[in-house]
Image: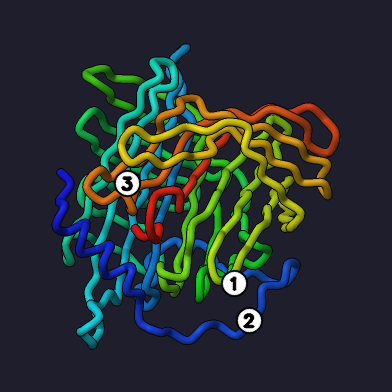
Amino acid sequence: MFRPCLAALVLLLAGCGTKAVSLPSAPLVAGQNPLVHLPRDQGNHPHDANEWWYVVGHLRAGTHSFGYEVTIFRLSHLNLPSESGPGITLYRTDLAITDETAHRFYHTIQYHFPGSGTFTTGRLGVHVGPAGLSGSLGAMTVTAALPSGALHLTLASRRPAMAVGGRGYLSFGNGFTYYYSLTDLATGGILRLKGHVYHVTGISWLDHQWGNWSWRAIRGWTWMALQLSDGTQLSVFDFRGQVHVLAASVLQGTHVRTVHDVRFTSLGSWRSPTDGAVYPIDQRVQIPSLRADLRVIPTVADQEMALPSQPVGSYWEGSGRVSGTFRGRAVTGYSYTELTGYTHGTPAP
């Protein structure tokens, strides 16, 4: 279960910032060779302070539909203000199942002490507490256990990886992040929820980020994974911090394009009964250069990953549906949206 004292320690350490690390000299230029190399970069990058593996997806068993999230964080080189040296490493797992049919949301957030996780370099193999992710691009396994249910899924990538930003590198806060996405993962397996067992199939999305930055330099972000009915897949984001990055990386076939004329408009909001945060969960996304005008609506309003004892660590992460036009043609689709920075304080994990 959640450990409030450990959560407070993590938030304090993250707010104090990570150790200064020199940044890569390579600029972010779309169209050049990517800075991310798979399958090697699926694994752990122990010299970078912040890293996470994030999987979300849309599942179906007959007429019953679900969304899910499995995220594993590694937070390294954390120091108290009065301390020096190499710092410590802590882990966090964020797990959720959205029962879209029953309009219910189940989630758990746990922090884990140093030494409680296993991380493989050079290939994918990440296991912390109740969550695990391993395997190759064509045959990954993701597992998770929540108080209300569990997941055991297989994932197979059907598309080339998206090097987000064009090269898989973005300015982030006062530093940088390497970043790639596997946007089209054929998914199947078992979902258990409230005593029921479902044999599910569907589609998933995997994000992997690693780099060096201070959480104090980040105010928050809006991020969307959009999988459209015409085969287009978009990573749309508004990173708000010392460097403001507003863009969309678009994968069509095997071609990735990054554009910056993105506009978000809130069409409806939801107020958290836990911490009072107001999240813009119903949004219009416009990208004139792509003739895109999309509405993203959640399947369930309350999909807040809430930390009642430490609201600064709470955020909204939820499954949704897309409708509108892309390149002037009508489309529908699936979405996952992440909203951070709407509670009080820095959005640190």
In the rendered image, which residue does mark 1 sit on? 35
Q: Could you say whether the residue bearing mark 1 is in a helix, strand or loop?
A: loop
Judge from the rendering whether residue 235 lies leftward or rightward of residue 143; answer left or right.
Answer: right
Q: Are marks 2 and 1 in contact (CB under 8 Å)?
A: yes
Residue type, label 1: Leu
Judge from the rendering whether residue 282 lies leftward or rightward of residue 77; answer left or right.
Answer: right
Which dot, 2 or 1, sits closer to the camera?
2
- Identity of the residue drawn at 41% across and 42% down: 277
Q: Could you say whether the residue bearing mark 2 is in a helix, strand or loop?
A: loop
Q: Is residue 83 above or below residue 150?
A: below
Labelled disc at residue 94: 3
Q: Nearer the viewer, residue 250 or 20?
A: 20
Rendered location of residue 119, percent (x, y): 29, 63
Rendered location of residue 146, percent (x, y): 24, 35
- Identity of the residue drawn at 52% across and 41% down: 337
Labelled disc at residue 26: 2
